[in-house]
Image (spheres, helix red, strand yellow):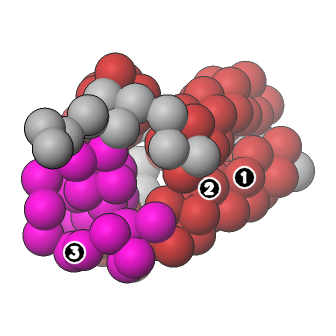
Amino acid sequence: MPFALALTAVLVLLAVFQLALVLGAPLGRFAWGGQHRLLPPRLRVGSAVSIVVYAFIAAIAWDRVGLIDIFGGAFSEVAMWVVVGYFALGILMNAVSRSVPERAVMVPVSIVLTGLSLLIALGYGELALAA
């Protein structure tokens, strides 16, 4: 459970960041390739979608460790491995960004997300259910 809670905490911070981008905060150098200080409308939509994706990922993680039961075991087990791959790809995508600030901030964040997701996918942190 601690890994799912830690993953959720990082995702909440990212969601707040994405919401700031949606609302016009001049933080675009940290996201979407860093080409825009203020995101254009299409990238603001992408940031809004990211918030929904983060919530879905948190729900998968919570389901996987047994905090909630909405997807069923088989789905959350497979989906958690997809999440690991998604965040691992994020390491690569952020590492090749032309934006130095994006690389400096988002590569470490992606590494943390990948590590936490991997631990959850491997079954660490599952709640012990009473028999």
User: Looking at the image, which is closer to me, 77 or 100?
Assistant: 77
Measure the alpha-carbon separation of dots 1 and 3: 23 Å
Apparent side of residue 39 relative to residue 89 in the rendered image (left or right): left
Name the amino acid, label 3.
Phe
Tell me the mark number nearer the camera, choosing from 1 and 3: 3
Residue 70 included in the magenta stretch of the image: yes
Number of residues whose C-alpha sits closer than 10 Å to that of mark 1, classed few (under 14), some (14–19) or many (20 or more): many
Give the SS element for disc 2.
helix
- Residue 29: quadrant of the picture: top right
Q: Magenta region: which residues? A: 51-77
- Residue 71: quadrant of the picture: bottom left
Point 34% across, 54% down: residue = 64
Q: Position of residue 121 (x, y in %)?
A: 54, 51
Point 35% across, 38% down: residue = 126
Q: Are marks 2 and 3 in contact (CB under 8 Å)?
A: no
Give the SS element for disc 1.
helix
Q: Position of residue 129 (x, y in %)?
A: 18, 40
Residue carrying label 2: 84
Q: Position of residue 20 (x, y in %)?
A: 25, 40
Q: Are marks 1 and 3 in contact (CB under 8 Å)?
A: no
Point 40% across, 30% down: residue = 125
Q: Does 91 sit above or below residue 64?
A: above
User: Looking at the image, which is closer to me, 102 or 15?
Assistant: 15
- Residue 131: quadrant of the picture: top left
Apparent side of residue 86 relative to residue 5 in the rendered image (left or right): right
User: Looking at the image, which is closer to me, 129 or 46?
Assistant: 129
Residue carrying label 3: 71
Q: Is residue 103 visible?
A: yes
Q: Does the magenta stretch mainly form a helix, a strand or a loop?
A: helix
